[in-house]
Amino acid sequence: MSTNKEVFLSVKNLEVSYSQARREVRAVNGVSFDVQKGKTLGLVGETGAGKTTIAKAILRILPDPPAKVKSGEIFLGGEDLLKKKEEDMLDVRGKKIAMIFQDPMTALNPLMTVGDQILEVLLLHNDYDKAAGMREAGRMLETVGIPAERYAEYPHQFSGGMKQRVVIAMALACNPELLLADEPTTALDVTIQAQVPELINDLKMKFGTSMILITHDLGVIAQTCDDVAVIYAGKIVESGTKEDVFDHPAHPYTLGLFGSLPDIDSRTSRLSPIAGMPPDPTNLPEGCSFHPRCPHATDACRKGQITSREITPGHFCACIREGGN
Amino acid sequence: MSRYVIKRLLLTVVILWCAGFVVFTLTYLVPGDVAKILLGPEATEDVLVIKRAALGLDQPYLVQLGRFMYNTFIRFDFGDSWVFSSSVMAELLERIPRTLIIGLSGMIINVSIGTILGIIAATHEGKWQDSFVMVIAMVFVSAPDFFVALLLILLFSLKLGWLPAYGIDSWTGYILPIISSSLGAIAVNARQSRSSMLEVIRADFVTTARAKGQKESVITRKHMLPNAMMPIITGVGGGLAVMIAGSPVIESVFSIPGVGAYLLSGVNQHDYPVVWACVIFLALFTSFAILIMDLCYAFLDPRIKAQYSRGKKVKG
Ligand SMILES: Nc1ncnc2c1ncn2[C@@H]1O[C@H](COP(=O)(O)OP(=O)(O)OP(=O)(O)O)[C@@H](O)[C@H]1O
Ligand code: SF4
Ligand SMILES: [Mg+2]
């Protein structure tokens, strides 16, 4: 991407698969992207596209078995995280890179007070004594809009939205340099949904954190992101600045996401903006993975290896169709 | 919380009444003339009549039942043994500690060994440690107590001469009974611990703990184990109840004068006061074990605690 920016995290050619009953679920298939320092990269894509898998691969917290990182490099400050020793990763997790998990209902330990769960990460990465840590954990609760008096309450005493805030507080507790936010709004009702991007923007301003924001909500991307990468079947099909992707979408899948795909048959599937189902990750289509659903598919799409090309500086699109839309 | 405990204790009393009613009725329904059995085939009709009157057997069922319930639950007296004419309560009280020593030490061994084996198996799922533990568990669970007991006697008493084969003249007499009665429970508990650990090992909150940079050993202890604990407690409590219920066999094999052996002799000799007393003790013991289990749940899980104290408007 542009040269005057400082790359904070660089993912190159990441491939992850899950082995499931002797079949291989190819969840991530050669994904490369950069996150600029202090900027937010939005990862959009349908369910099952591989977004969460990418985030967990960066932190190396994929369940193994069944998950296996088959290839790739993840550079953080010139160091490949995938080559680090497990014990060195302990200092990266929670401190340098923190993650907000997709489902706040299950992300918290039901048998531990919310305060203690925040305290845990604080004590791991700071030299506080317990009392100072507890004060800091209370302060983190206040930061996300929960009264510090609720420190000693358990997750079941909180609403879904408040649990999400606790999860956010936990992730931000040690001022991470990079935040992986996995659909931080989906579990929330509409009114709180609107508050979370604001909250995230506030915190980003305050701490200058770089961020990968995973979502399938284009509105959230518009509100919070600088750059966007669109993921389909474990591949990035289009990437660029938010303006590039929002104002000049080029890939037929991106166009479909924006609902601008000329599609006469879509009356039957109003809920999904694109007709057809996402491909089966155990049996990906040859050529362009999107071809079964693409209105512009040609024979060339079904066979050839589709490579990404740079349409305008910094704006990439993995489609062989000339001229975009 | 205390209200909950009181409620449960009252419930225990009701359970004991029911147990008393059932066991009395069952012994009443056993066919055959008890007086004849007690006195032998040569007894004359006159003697039998006197015996029946002495034991109250000539009374109608309801009168007998009423007297039994009154003596047992109001006067806390089971009367005298029909065979030995000694106080059943005194004998029972003397025997209870012996049975409890075996049951409770078995439980402690079970908790420590069984649970740890299960955790090792779960955290090494699919590796050799896992298979090893599961094979041991399979062997333990499928070998009957008395068979294990006989093998242990053969090896440690007859061949090596390290431990006594029977009796409790010294504390070493307890070692073999404890081992042979707890192996099955260890196996059950190891399997239970393994499967409930496997359930939490992939839980989201465990991933959350990893994402914090927490060490794997601490994650196991602080996040996985407490969440896997409920079924483990259930298993251990159930194991204890099974061990106590299985005490007649082990106590007979090792000639230990405990409650189990007492129950068995009571049944064999139609000494019904002994049977009633032992069964009510077993019911009491099981009720307490379950109550303690439930209190452990509440102690571990704030959600259950909240449930127990609901209606009292006390939180946490
Ligand atoms: N533990 C697992 N075992 C087997 N397959 C898995 C596992 N976790 C994820 N997958 C598969 O990997 C693919 C990518 O999953 P992932 O969770 O990364 O998707 P996602 O983009 O985050 O979707 P969502 O929007 O629903 O969160 C899916 O096909 C999913 O079925
Ligand atoms: S490569 Fe072909 S099938 Fe794939 S998105 Fe482009 S036009 Fe459609
Ligand atoms: Mg996801």
Image (cartoon, coloured by chain):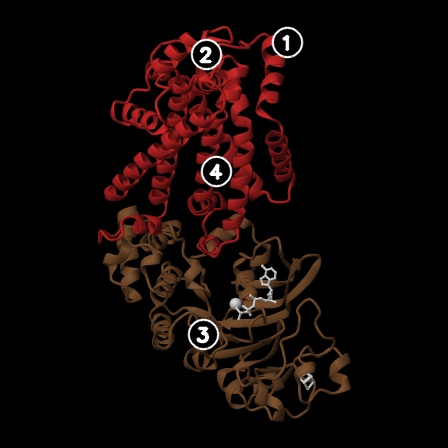
Chain colours: A brown, B red
Image quarter of residue A156: bottom left
Label 3 resides on the chain identified as A
Badge 3 is on which residue? A39
Q: Is residue A93 left or right of residue A65?
A: left
Q: Position of residue A155 (x, y in %)?
A: 35, 57
| Residue shown at the point (58%, 10%) measured from the top left | B157
The Cα–Cα distance between marks 4 and 2, rounded to whole angstroms, is: 41 Å
Q: Identity of the amino acid at label 3? A: Lys
Closer to the camera, B242 or B172? B242
Query: Across the whole image, how many numbered discs are drawn on residues?
Result: 4
Residue B226 - label? none
Disc 1 versus disc 3: nearer the observer: 1
The Cα–Cα distance between marks 1 and 2, rounded to whole angstroms, is: 41 Å
Number of other residues with Cα within 10 Å of mark 2, as a class: few under 14, some 14 to 19, many 20 or more = some
Q: Position of residue A6 (x, y in %)?
A: 49, 72
* The residue positioned farthest toward the front in the image shown: B45
Q: Is residue B181 left or right of residue B237?
A: right
Image quarter of residue B35: top left
Q: Identity of the amino acid at label 1? A: Lys
Q: Position of residue B42 (x, y in %)?
A: 50, 6
Q: Identity of the amino acid at label 4? A: Gly
In the image, the residue with mark 1 has its CB under 8 Å from the nearest atom of ligand 1: no
In the picture, the quarter occupied by the N terminus of chain A is bottom right
Residue B38 - label? 2
Residue B159 - label? 1
The Cα–Cα distance between marks 2 and 3, rounded to whole angstroms, is: 93 Å
- Say whether residue B257 is visible: no
